[in-house]
Image: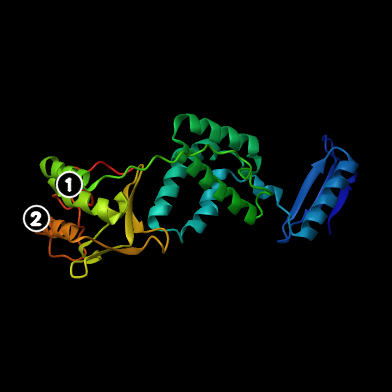
Amino acid sequence: MAHVRDLRKRKGGYTGDNPWQVRFETPEGVERAENFRTKPKATKRLNAIEADKERGSFVDPAMGRITFAGFVDLHYRQTMVALEPSTRARDESYLRTHILPVFGTKPIAAIDYTACQAWVSELSTRRAPATAVKAAQIASKVFKAAVKSKVIVVNPMAEVTLPKVERGEDWFLTPAQVQELAEAMTIVAPRLRAFVWLGCYGGPRIGELLALRWSDIDFLRRTVTIQRKVIEIQGVGLVEGRTKTAAGRRTVTLPRAVMAELEAHRAAYGSAGAEDLVFRSADGAPTPSEQPAPT
């Protein structure tokens, strides 16, 4: 049973500065002890422990001494197994590049709101707002997992002010401009002519175009089905996965002119394999060599 004892009365005595010891068991039955200078402080701590255990909010102080990196390795990565491969690769990249270098060696319970806000503010000075926001979101997920695991009491990222991500202005090409761009591609990057036509009239994102396979195109019904995407992860490269939501998986009907461009593209650069990529470089890489890497 939890209690307070005076270490000076034990056999052999005690000469330290904190003679009042609180002895208790965690909800898992693990024995713990904490020492204090005075009996009132020890008694106050004992009462707090008992109240937290009663409420189900007890956090083992010993668990809080685990480092941020240690918690990620031992606990958080287990929660990542259900993520799409592309999402998992992205999160790992952010952890490795932006989060672990700052928090990795610190005890997770010692990381507070002030440290988190300072990190986000500093990161915002050298990275785009969207990068800082995504890094903060991933760090927050780690802290939330730590709260659920009863390693810390609160998520120190919860009240952090994030930079504002300004949405860029959308630009829409006229049919004449689409034609002009496609003709330019015929000269400088012919493998991208159909890429331009499909991108402008079908609406796929660049990553969705790069993941498109011939089996996704129905030439009889003039449709293209979007169900995969490719993203570029810093330090990893191109990673393919399914679109994030069910709404993102869609079938789009295309104009006859666009289908004609895809027919011509298949005749010039396609292959017999239904699962081969529609847009690829001459050596079969998953992105045309002339196409800038997606951001």
Q: Position of residue 127 (x, y in %)?
A: 44, 33
Residue at image location 83% in from the left, 47% down from the top:
45
Residue 295 figure quarter: top left
The kind of residue tagged 1 is Gln
The kind of residue tagged 2 is Ala
Please give the count of numbered marks on the rendered protein.
2
Closer to the camera, 242 or 39?
A: 242
Where is mark 2, residue-wise?
268
Q: Which mark is residue 179?
A: 1
Residue at image location 48% in from the left, 39% down from the top:
165
Asked if residue 70 shows in the view, the reply is: yes
Left or right position of 4 against 170 = right
Q: Position of residue 129 (x, y in %)?
A: 47, 37
Q: Which mark is residue 96?
A: none
Residue at image location 67% in from the left, 48% down from the top:
154
Q: Position of residue 26 (x, y in %)?
A: 74, 57
**Mark 2 nearby-residue class (10 Å; few <14, some 14–19, many ≥20):** few
Tag 1, which secondary structure?
Answer: helix
